[in-house]
Each structure stands twice: as structure tokens, then as C-alpha cells.
């Protein structure tokens, strides 16, 4: 069995340095658009897998083999796993958590060098990799979706990557982001992005935004990790 330290090292090796830049986000429901300026950061080339979670001492649930993305994880679960991975890797955890079931007491120490969820802006900027289109390639070539997945998740990094060598940002599983979706309307609900193995093409787009409560779990919703640049 892979040791926790070996799993942490494999995740560290998967990190891709992403240059800073500017991204315009858009909410299709309200028509609102806004710009976000980004500092350089690092993002994992692929989602966290079931094998990663097992090696870190947790038992994954949800469908798929060892190299499939881990699913059935809430936003709160993902936050906890980010901190657990950071401690395993000897890094400073990014999050301070509490007992609030809505996750409103979770705080992010932006100076910490540990693992964290990407922001929504980081996620879309990474997904596009400079491509202004609907998605960064032909859907069947880059993504596992309802039309080609056979009704199940697939091992990560088995479809074509984008220009920055990032895999599965479209399809296979949705991915939790740090951000609230719209706190004035939806309270504690958090954003997830990317589309999953059971989704139609409209959901598998770089700009598609979804949301749910931080305790929500689903069999096609997982996450990938980010860190500060240069670590």
C-alpha cells in the first residue's frame, strides 16, 4: 500500500505553475460579469483520486477504480482533506475550521504554503489556458461526459489535456472551488465547476457555474488542489 508520504509526494509532483493574469467571470442566470486579477499560483494537473485518499488514511466512497477521481465529498470534506494533505506533506494548513454546519466559520490563511481549493477565478483561468472558446478542445477528446463515459467515472488523465497540461477540467467530475456562489441570494452555497461523467455538453463548458450547500455530496463531484506559486 502506498504510504501517506508517497501519496503527498505524487500530488506535489502533479502541480503545474500557472502564470498570473486576468479573467472575466460571468453568471449566465443574472447576466452579471466581473473581472478578477490573479497572482501566479500552482494547480494540480489532475483531480484527487480514490487512491490518493486511501493512501492518506481515509476510505473513499463513490464509484470508480483506484485512479478515478474521488467523489461523494462535500466542500467541508474537501477542506478537511486539503489540511490533512498539508500536514502529511509538512506544510502549513491553509484553513482554520470550526463546527458550523454551513462552513461559515472556515477561514483561509492566504500566507500558508499548504494545499487548498482553487478559487473560482483560478479554476476558470486554468481551464481556459488562454483559450476563449466554450471549452479547450473537442468534447470527446478532452472529457468523459454522458455521451462517452458509459455511465461511470474514469481514471484521471486519460483524455487530452489543455495547453497548460491540465487534465479533466472539463468532464469526469465537477470540482469544488473555494468561493461562495452568491451569498446574498444563496447564503453559504459554494461553487463547483467543470461538468461530470453524467452531464450533457451544455454543462461541460469552461464558463458553466453550479452551486450547492457545503455539506452536499454527489457521485460526480470531487476536487483538485492548488498552492501558492513557487513552492
Image (tube, grey):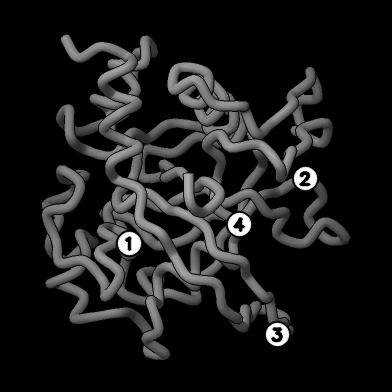
- Residue 116 visible to an observer of this rendering: yes
Taking the image as shown, residue 71 lies to the left or right of residue 113, namely left
Tell me which corner region of the image, top left, top right, bottom left or bottom right, holds residue 202.
bottom left
Q: How many marks?
A: 4
Badge 1 or badge 2: first in the primary sequence? 2
For label 4, the crowd category at 10 Å Cα-Cα, with few meaning under 14, some 14 to 19 and many 20 or more, is some
> What's the mark number on residue 199?
1
Badge 2 or badge 3: first in the primary sequence? 3
Q: Which residue is mark 4?
A: 119
> What's the mark number on residue 33?
3
Badge 3 or badge 4: first in the primary sequence? 3
Q: Position of residue 179 (x, y in %)?
A: 68, 54
Q: At 48% from the left edge and 70% from the top edge, which residue is drawn?
A: 19
Is label 1 or label 2 in front?
A: 2
Is label 3 or label 4 in front?
A: 4
Is label 1 or label 4 in front?
A: 4
Amino acid at each position: 500500500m502506498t504510504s501517506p508520504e508517497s501519496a503527498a509526494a505524487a500530488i506535489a509532483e502533479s502541480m503545474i505553475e500557472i502564470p498570473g493574469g486576468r479573467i472575466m467571470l460571468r453568471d449566465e442566470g443574472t447576466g452579471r460579469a466581473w473581472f478578477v486579477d490573479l497572482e501566479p499560483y500552482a494547480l494540480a494537473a489532475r483531480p484527487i483520486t480514490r487512491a490518493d485518499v486511501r493512501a492518506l488514511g481515509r476510505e473513499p466512497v463513490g464509484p470508480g477504480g483506484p485512479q478515478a477521481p474521488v467523489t461523494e465529498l462535500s466542500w467541508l470534506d474537501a477542506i478537511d482533506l486539503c489540511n490533512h494533505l498539508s500536514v502529511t506533506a509538512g506544510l502549513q494548513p491553509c484553513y482554520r475550521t470550526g463546527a458550523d454546519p454551513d462552513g461559515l466559520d472556515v477561514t483561509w490563511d492566504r500566507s500558508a504554503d499548504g494545499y487548498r481549493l482553487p478559487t473560482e477565478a483560478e479554476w476558470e483561468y486554468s481551464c481556459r489556458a488562454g483559450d476563449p472558446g466554450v471549452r479547450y478542445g473537442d468534447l470527446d477528446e478532452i472529457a468523459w461526459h454522458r455521451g462517452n463515459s458509459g455511465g461511470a467515472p474514469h481514471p484521471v488523465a486519460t483524455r487530452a489535456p489543455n495547453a497548460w497540461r491540465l487534465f479533466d477540467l472539463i468532464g469526469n467530475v465537477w470540482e469544488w472551488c473555494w468561493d461562495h456562489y452568491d451569498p446574498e441570494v444563496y447564503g453559504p452555497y459554494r461553487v463547483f465547476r467543470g461538468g461530470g461523467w453524467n452531464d450533457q455538453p451544455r454543462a461541460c463548458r469552461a464558463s458553466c457555474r453550479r452551486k450547492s450547500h457545503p455539506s452536499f455530496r454527489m457521485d460526480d463531484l470531487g476536487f483538485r488542489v492548488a498552492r501558492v506559486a513557487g513552492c
